[in-house]
Image (cartoon, rainbow, N blue to C red):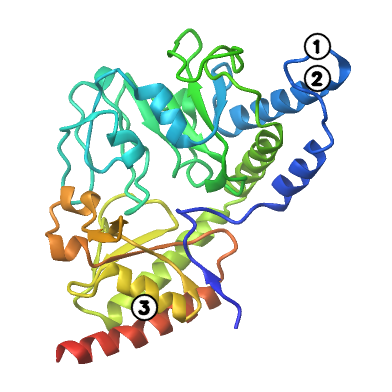
Amino acid sequence: MARIYLDYNATTPLRPEARAAMIDAMDAVGNPSSVHTEGRAAKGLIERARRQVSQALGAEGADVVFVSSATEAAALALAGRGLTCADVEHEAVSAWCDPVLPVDGDGRVTVSDPANATLQVANSETGVIQTLPEGLAVTDATQAFGKLPFAFNWSNADMAFVSAHKIGGPKGIGALVMKRGLNVEARIKGGGQEMGRRSGTENVIGIAGFGAAAQAAARDLDAGRWGQVEQLRNILEKRLSESSRTTIFVGKDANRLPNTSCFITPGWKGETQVMVMDLAGVAVSAGSACSSGKVRASRVLRAMGYDDEQAASALRVSLGPDTTEGDISAFAEAWLREYEKFRARRGD
């Protein structure tokens, strides 16, 4: 039986357009910092991708700085600034900020001082979408990019960062987007590549794949493919809610990413659900995280007011443009079958 992939928020399958662009870029032998013909050819691939990412992000006129990942971009944007954030942020963000901003039960964050704060566009676990305040210092647009009609130039933020592998591009390449005229202190120093913000010979192959993926993702968004994904997500939640009265759908009353469903079945460990679904041929993620083999409850869900048992009993299903109704049906059947076994073990 063919496996079913429902973990698009973790990473996405490589798009054919990205694969083709990367294969072509392998023939670019020059160093993009060299001034000879071969070097200029490699540099041309980078600048083409920079335009593609800029256009897909609605960031014309802004600076697009290529880095190794959204995690590195977050460090570049946030390190040493002492910004505030909420506990629903990705750990790559919360590592650099003070998580004091209040979060309500639907995962929405209140920002009182935007110029000294960072706020994500959408949450990777719950899919909850935030309203960005005017004058926001930095936003994590990683999960929103390609799924929502997001434009950096209309985002109210001074900086944003994104990752290629969330939109069908290769792993190991991301970007920091900045309003022109702003600056950050380079954390990797050396040759002054990427407008002096990130030294080191550029990953030409990864960057080329990123640009092609961004262009293709923008086409999918314009074509309404994520609206179709949202319909499938809603079908799934309806099916599960009709058969499991104890299951809680996180952020159900909030604006969410069209592809994301995070649901809690109290007492049924999230990592256990992931394992039994994997054995059933379906890839999904737990709302709880593992660190050095020790399971801990999701701090995102705890920040929203869920208790430890609930926060450790979440499952995240994240769909993509290639997900079919058959995939959703197969997952629902497998999950409900295991849910009945869980109920029987508890004596419900």
Amino acid tagged 2 = Gly
Q: Is residue 1 visible?
A: yes
Per the image, the residue denoted by label 2 is: 39
Q: Mark 2–mark 1 contact, CB under 8 Å?
A: yes
Kind of residue indicated by mark 3: Arg
- Residues at marks 2 and 1, CA–CA distance in whole angstroms: 6 Å
- Residue 134 in the image: state x and y as whole percent: 31, 22
Residue 29 relative to residue 111: left or right: right
Q: Could you tell me which residue is drawn at 18 percent across and 74 percent down?
A: 267
232, above or below 260, in the image = below
Residues at badges 3 and 2 in contact (C-beta under 8 Å)? no
x and y, in percent, of residue 104 in the image: 16, 45
- Place residue 258 in its image quadrant: bottom left
Q: Residue furthest top?
A: 181
Residue at image mark 3:
239
Going 14% across and 60% down the picture, which residue do you hit? 308
Left of 144 or right of it: where is 108?
Answer: left
